[in-house]
Amino acid sequence: MLRVVLTHLFLFLIPFIAYAFWLWINKKAQTSQNWREGPMAWLAFAGVVIVSASLVLLATFERSPEGKTYMPAEIRDGEFIPGHYE
């Protein structure tokens, strides 16, 4: 679960990282005023769009095999049986 949260957090932060890199390349990061007056709402909107697109793509392409039922992981007779499709 933590992996999923960190992945989506990273995806949300991509526009902010790109903006910081752009400020650094253009040497405009001398003051923090660029961050205060910067396009924070647009960067946040772009982050939400990226995360939303990743969720839509994940739901579209990560489907279970058709006609199969997922059997969750279990411990049977002291042996761990991983989750699988039957």
Image (spheres, rainbow, N blue to C red):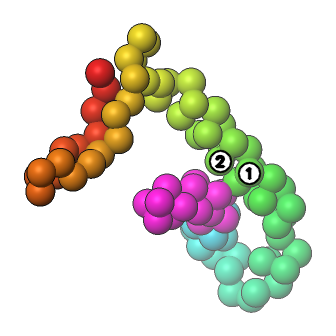
Looking at the rendering, the stretch of residues picked out in magenta corresponds to 1-17
> Residue 7 colored magenta?
yes
Which quadrant is the C terminus positioned in?
top left
Q: Is residue 30 left or right of residue 33?
A: left
Look at label 2 and name its amino acid.
Val
Residue 66 forms part of the magenta stretch:
no
Residue occupied by mark 1: 48
Looking at the image, residue 70 sits to the left or right of residue 40; the answer is left
Which label sits on residue 1?
none
Outermost residue, top side: 67
Q: Which mark is residue 51?
A: 2
Give SS at disc 1: helix
The one nearer the camera, 29 or 45, is 45
Q: Nearer the viewer, residue 4 or 67?
A: 67
In this rendering, is residue 59 above or below 12? Answer: above
User: Label 1 sits on what residue type?
Assistant: Val
Callout 1 touching callout 2 (CB < 8 Å): yes
Q: Mark 1, residues whose alpha carbon is within 10 Å: few (<14), some, or many (≥20)?
A: some
Q: Position of residue 24 (x, y in %)?
A: 59, 73
Q: What is the CA distance from the residue labelled 1 to the residue labelled 2?
A: 5 Å
- Can see residue 83? yes
* Residue depicted at 80% across the width and 53% down the height: 45
How many numbered circles does the render carry? Answer: 2
In the image, is residue 81 above or below residue 14?
above
Mark 2 element type: helix
For residue 71, what is the image quadrant?
top left
